[in-house]
Image (tube, rainbow, N blue to C red):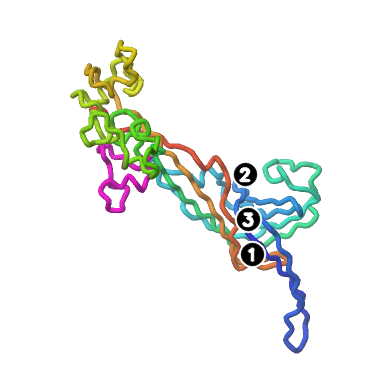
Amino acid sequence: MKKLLYVFLSVFTFISCDDGDIITEELDFEDTFSACGELVFYKIKEDPAESLSLRITSVSKTLDSLIATDDNGVLYLTEEVYAINGTSNFFNYRRYNTTPADFFCNDVPPSNITITNDEESTTGTATVYISLVEDDNDGIPAEMEDINGNGDLTDDDSDGDGIPDYLDEDDDGDNVLTRLEIDTADADGDDDPTTNPIDTDGDGIPNYLDTDDDGDGVETIDEENDSQDEDPSNDFTSTNPAITVADYLNDAVSNTVAATAYKDHDIQQVFKITIELRSIELPSITYDFLDFGTLEDTSLTTERTVEDIPFP
């Protein structure tokens, strides 16, 4: 938890130098904050009932506009600086008669909440930092998908579809998701699915990188024997009740029913927003620097969908 230290100075005017009396009070706020509306950021506590808030009105933006990306998942914004002036952008410390739940996200604040003390800074800057981490959630940690071992995840593309493996939920392009082709049981206990991979045909190529998993001469992507839906994992055509694996893992089934398209890819996006304040001057305290914390919001985790290369 952040320990926000309030320092109150009683300054006396004497001919000689006098530092005055110093009274300190600690206010415990969480490291995280919340957001609502058009760029209203706030953190509250219950005992005593207090809040710190930053309201940006100098620009017409929403939280969604801060985390907007282009088609390649690149952020349009990584940093925004706003001047706090008490006219268009506001930073406040407040005390209340009760916990200010729902105070900031309603057009009309609850009638039972009364502000008992309101201090506002008319100077300072607020810097909003935006960052993004993307992952394919395929069961293989991104750092383990550096196939060539050069430390650059962006140049490892096993199936040549233009999507690097760490963002590709189907690394070998066979329309079977990687997470369905790896050993999730972790039998060796090393938390590394690449050291004990599933290799159905025993050719030394793990299934998640093998375009013909059962070695029957028909590529996995073309074993759409039951339904042509870009998903070989749900095609079971064997009449033998003892066979419980899909056709693409059964070398006794080698029918070719060509796929008509590649799966689209879903890439998980996790955004992070942090705020730093500088040169804040409230009536009772001055902050040269204040770490406002990190935004806690489940909507900062989302997905983007990428179409694979055109089907041949």
Q: Which residue is mark 3?
A: 89
Q: Quadrant of the C terminus?
A: top left
Residue, x 75% and y 53% (percent of image)? 47
Q: Vertical placement of 229 versus 58: above or below?
A: above
Three-letter amino acid code at disc 1? Ile
Three-letter amino acid code at disc 3? Asn
SS at mark 3 in the image? strand
How much space separates mark 1 and mark 3, taking CA atoms? 12 Å
Q: Quadrant of the N terminus?
A: bottom right
Instruction: Pick whichever of labels 3 and 2 is earlier in the sequence.
Output: 2
Q: Which residues are magenta?
A: 140-167
Q: Position of residue 283 (x, y in %)?
A: 73, 66
Residue, x 43% and y 44% (percent of image)? 69
Q: Vertical placement of 25 versus 51: above or below?
A: below
Q: Closer to the camera, 28 or 285? A: 28
How much space separates mark 3 and mark 2, taking CA atoms? 15 Å
Prevailing SS of the magenta stretch: loop
Q: Is 49 on the left or on the right of 137, as rendered? A: right
Q: Which residue is mark 2?
A: 36
